Image (cartoon, rainbow, N blue to C red):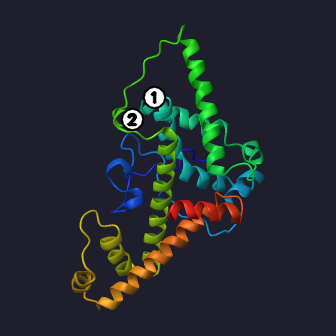
Amino acid sequence: MNLTCKANKKELAGKAASRKCGNGSHRVDADTAIGGHGDHFPSTQLSLLEAAASGLSSEALDRVITIYWKPVYRFIRLKFHKNNEDAKDLTQGFFATALERDFFTRFHPEKASFRTYLRMAVERFAANQHAAANRQKRGGDTEFETIGEQAASTDSPEQVFEREWQRQLFCLALDDLRAHSEECGKQLQFRIFQAYDLAEGERPSYAELADQHGVPETSVTNYLAWARRMLRGFVTERLRGTTAGWRELRKEMRRVWS
C-alpha cells in the first residue's frame, strides 16, 4: 500500500480551483506534492471506514489517506511549527503507525465525526513525537523553521485542517467530474462549467459562453445545471466513504455546502 497516495506531479489539474479550493489563503500548500488527489472513487458503495476496519481492502485505507494526508500535514506543520520535511515525516509516521485496524475499530461515531476523531489522534501522535524529540535534544532547545504563512494568518491549526479537508474534498470531486465527463463524451459540458463556475476572475456571461462554444444559451444553462448536480453527487460519494452512516453524512454535507 502506498502511504503517500501517489503524489501528483501537479498540485491542481486545469483550473480545479473553485471557491472551496481557490488561490490565496485557500490555495494548496506549495511545499509538498504529497497528498495528491488523482485517484477516483471506487465503484463499491461499502463505507471505506468499514472496509479498512475489517481489513477487507488496503485500497480502502488508501482512499481515506487520499482525503486526509494533506489536511494532517498542514495541521502538524502549523500546530507544532514544523518545517516542510519534518511535517512530512510526522504525517508519514502517523499514517504508518496509527491507521491500523484497531484505529478504525476504536472510532465511535456517536462521540464525534471521523474527521474530528482523526484530527485528535494526529494531535496526540504529533505531541508525543514532539516531546520525545525535545527530550533527545538535552533540554529541548530545538529550533523550528519560521512559517511565514502562519505568522500572517489568524486561522488556528484546527481551522486550517478544516479548510484543507474541504479543499481536498472538492478537488477530488472535481477530478471525478472531469474524468466522468471525458468517459461520457461530455467534455463540452465540463469546459463550460470550468469557464463559469471555476473562473478565477470575472465570470463570462451565458451569452458569451454560448457564442464561444457555438451552442444555444439554453444549453449553457442546462450544461451548468448538469455539472453542478454531478459535482454534488461526487462530493457526496467521497464523503460517504469517510462517514459512519447517514446521520454523519448529512451533517458533513451541511457543513460542506453551507
Q: Hey, what amino acid is under mark 1?
A: His
Q: Which x, y percent locates residue 86?
A: 47, 29
Disc 1 vs disc 2: which is toward the camera?
Answer: 2
Q: Which x, y percent locates residue 23?
A: 32, 53
Q: Which x, y percent locates residue 96?
A: 63, 38
Q: Residues within 10 Å of mark 1 (few under 14, many from 20)?
A: some
Q: Which x, y percent locates residue 176?
A: 49, 67
Instruction: Give the residue pinned by disc 2.
Output: 150
Give the secondary structure at mark 2. Answer: helix
Q: Is residue 38 above or below residue 202?
A: above
Q: Hey, what amino acid is under mark 2?
A: Gln
Q: Are marks 1 and 2 in contact (CB under 8 Å)?
A: yes
Residue at left 50%, top 33%?
Answer: 79
Residue at left 52%, top 61%?
Answer: 256
**Residue closer to the observer: 80 or 73:** 80
Q: Determine which of the numbered discs, if any, sits on residue 81 in the image.
A: 1
